[in-house]
Amino acid sequence: MMRADVHMHSTFSHDSDASPEQMILGAIEKKLEMICFTDHFDKDNMAWGEEDIFDPEKYFCVLSPLSEKYKDQIDVRIGVELGFQPHLGAYYHTFVEKYPFDFVIGSVHFAGGYDIAHGELFEEHSDEEVYRLILEESLEDIKVMDDFDVLGHLDYMARYGKEKEKAYSYQKFSEIIDEILKTLVAKGKGIELNMAGLKYGLSFAHPCRDVLKRYRELGGEIITVGSDGHKPEHIAYDFQKAADILTACGFKYYTEFSARRPVFKQLA
């Protein structure tokens, strides 16, 4: 099983009620060696009130002592999940440079001005139309963003469509997905294997296997593994499947980050 879960949330995220210490204790109980907190920071998302929840100064003031407290039991690292929107490139550059994050995930939670998870986008459009819109905006985002390490849950939108994965496949959107993957590889950025797709009842973790295989074919090597956990019971969700998924898709290593530098770990 993987030794590290590098995508997790706490009360510093709008959608978690679990304290950072509860998440750390949950990870210790599951015998992980390392975790990385990646709480949400979605600038300009007033619906979430994110800037009130995610106070970066308080974030480090809370997490750094906890990292020290539990250092003999688990390695606790401090990251962030940035909510991408095309106009935020300059803002996020300054934000990321200001704080000593170990790891930065860039994720697309908004498209066309709407929160994907709230479902409004799907009310007047087909799943296929919405999925294409989100992928196009994802490409626009990563073209203008440089201050991230991996792109989070690339096909996350399949969780929320009316037909979910029935309207989605790599083949259906291969042209735009290939452009996303080529851009990431050219920029030296990675993707994540986000196991929450399985938790949400999909038949795949994010992204689906065909996308993982294509990323590897295009020369992509940086891939992290995370549960996207928001509760202690979510930590390391279905991690017993992760190594087999990656191996089947052509990977020999997975990646952890420390001080924004990738460290490659051989798959067992």
Image (cartoon, grey):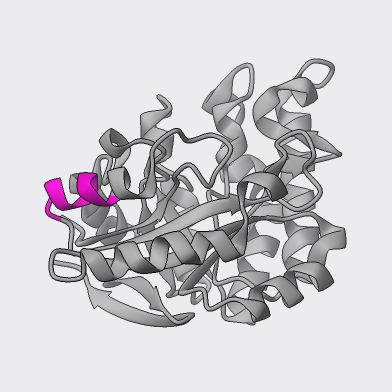
The picture places residue 130, in percent across and down from the top left corner, at 76, 32
The picture places residue 196, in percent across and down from the top left corner, at 41, 38
- Apparent side of residue 245 relative to residue 1 in the rendered image (left or right): right
- Apparent side of residue 86 relative to residue 102 in the rendered image (left or right): right
Residue 10, quarter of the rendered image:
top left
Nearer-the-camera pick, 249 or 226: 226
State the residue at coordinates (56%, 24%): 164
Nearer-the-camera pick, 2 or 10: 10
Q: Visible in this render: residue 150?
A: yes
Quadrant where the C terminus sits is bottom left
Above or below residue 97? Residue 230 is: above
- 26 within the magenta span: yes
Above or below residue 72? Residue 108 is: above
The picture places residue 59, in percent across and down from the top left corner, at 52, 60
Q: Visible in this render: residue 251?
A: no
- In the image, which residues are magenta? 24-31
The prevailing secondary structure element of the residues shown in magenta is helix
Above or below residue 58? Residue 236 is: above
Nearer-the-camera pick, 86 or 29: 29
Residue 68, quarter of the rendered image:
bottom left
State the residue at coordinates (40%, 24%): 201
Quadrant where the N terminus sits is bottom left
State the residue at coordinates (83%, 59%): 86
Above or below residue 52? Residue 1 is: below
The picture places residue 24, in percent across and down from the top left corner, at 27, 52
- Apparent side of residue 96 relative to residue 29 in the rendered image (left or right): right
State the residue at coordinates (69%, 24%): 118
Nearer-the-camera pick, 115 or 251: 115
